[in-house]
Image: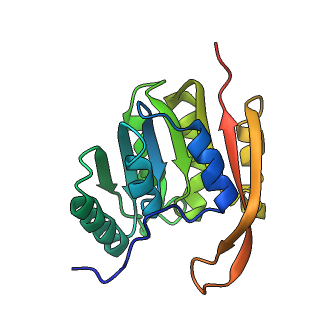
Amino acid sequence: MSTIKIPPHPCLSQAAIDHFESILRPDFRIFELGAGGSTLWLARRAAQVVSVEHDREWYEAVEAAIISEDLANVDLRYQPLQPEDKLNPWKDYSIEILQFNNDFFDLAFVDGWDPARLPCAAYAQGKVKPGGYVVVDDTNQPYLQAVFGILQGWARHDVAGRILGRIDGAIVDNQTTFFRKPEL
């Protein structure tokens, strides 16, 4: 059994959490790259959450929290990285969303393992319904600047704030971007 304690909320700034609250609806189907406190938080606010995690210990801790809270609307999937694939060890993790039909999800939350975020955001374009959202965390980081080109033409709302650092507990600047797919 894992000793990791999963927080009851996303690791986002309060401003980003508030904006998230304003767009979520109880009938939403959500895809999430990177499980955690956000999985629990989203599951309490949506009809369905499909969440993919690559770290076994973290996956087991999230799974225990889901069971503890009796969240039957979560489909938690473990998809380990493939270190033998030197060019793309995150491929299977980032393409998990491709198993679903186009326009299946109302929202895709991309906050998983860093190198997998850009491909997952690209794949999410077709899997999110018109008028739906792709939410990408840490868009203030240089490695994620390409996401603005990937989702060019989508309405964009940047939410900046400060969060408690995930590793060392330091206060860090953060930006979460909410992209809205154009209606047909």
Q: Is residue 181 visible?
A: yes
Residue 126 picture location, percent across and down: 54, 28
Quarter of the rendering occupied by the N terminus: bottom left
Q: Is residue 84 left or right of residue 137?
A: left
54 lies left or right of 71 = right
Relative side of 167 to 61, left or right: right
Please give the name of the residue rendered at 63% of the width and 78% of the height, measured from the top-left corner.
165
Q: Quadrant of residue 3?
A: bottom left
Farthest-out residue, bottom: 168
Query: Could you tell me residue 104's position as x and y percent?
Result: 43, 27
Q: Is residue 46 left or right of residue 166?
A: left
> What residue appears at the point 60 percent right and 54 percent down from the top-left corner?
17
Identify which residue, 121 or 10, lies in the foreground: 10
Q: Residue at x 72, y 56 (%)?
A: 139
Tell me: residue 60, above or below residue 118: below
Please tell me which residue lies in front, 113 or 71: 71
For the question of whether residue 95 can be seen, the reply is: no
- The image shows residue 172, relative to residue 39, as above or below, that is below
